[in-house]
Image (tube, grey):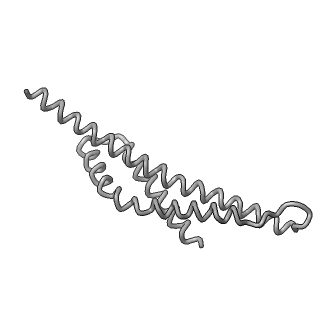
Amino acid sequence: MGLQWMLLTCVVGAEAAVAALLTLPAPRAVRAQIVGLTSMLLQPMAAVLPFAAFQLLDIYWKNEHRLICTGEMCTSEERVRFEKSIFKSQRNVILCVSVFILYWSIYRICKFNKDIKALEEVEKRIKEE
């Protein structure tokens, strides 16, 4: 069960590194190379989005069908295990949501950079005329 969360953790780490790399100041030539490479990687990276959505649905289903441990009939060990599973579920939801947010952020940063480059080319053509 932990392998899927380890995979999502690695993906979130990689997406965070790419987002940080895209937002760092760099010369235009280097930035163009970074944006081009990242744009090519966006489509294969999108494969993790359905996986994260499935994991969110799995967490929701497990939360709806979880045995609730409240009241006098639960032992302290059962309460601790119940609370620990709740904390793990919350952590995993944050992980899945961060996959979506980081992917969207990387996509928008690349799109903004491409738009800026296109506008600079238009401006250069207008100045040449």
Q: Residue at point 82% right, 64% down?
A: 69
Residue 56 % position (x, y): 57, 60
- The picture places residue 110, in percent across and down from the top left corner, at 33, 46
Residue 111, position as x, y percentages in the image? 32, 44
Residue 55 falls in image quadrant: bottom right
* 6, 96: nearer the viewer: 96
Residue depicted at x 26% and y 50%: 33
- Quarter placement of the N terminus: bottom right
Q: In this view, does 93 lie above or below 117?
A: below
Q: Which of the image's four quarters has the C terminus?
A: top left
In the shown orientation, is residue 13 left or right of residue 115?
A: right
Q: Is residue 20 visible?
A: no
Residue at 18% across, 36% down? 121
Q: Which residue is outermost to the left?
A: 129
Residue drawn at x 92%, y 63% as measured from the top left: 72
Count numbered badges in the picture. Answer: 0
Where 72 sits versus 128, above or below? below
Residue 81 is left or right of residue 4, and the answer is right
User: Does residue 78 appear in the picture of this structure?
Assistant: yes
Q: Is residue 26 toward the left or the right of residue 66 in the image?
A: left
Residue 90: x %, y % from top left: 65, 56
Pick whichever, 67 or 45, lies toward us. Answer: 67
Relative placement, left or right, of 77 versus 9 is right
Front-lying residue, 100 or 91: 100
The single residue placed furthest to the right in the displayed view is 72
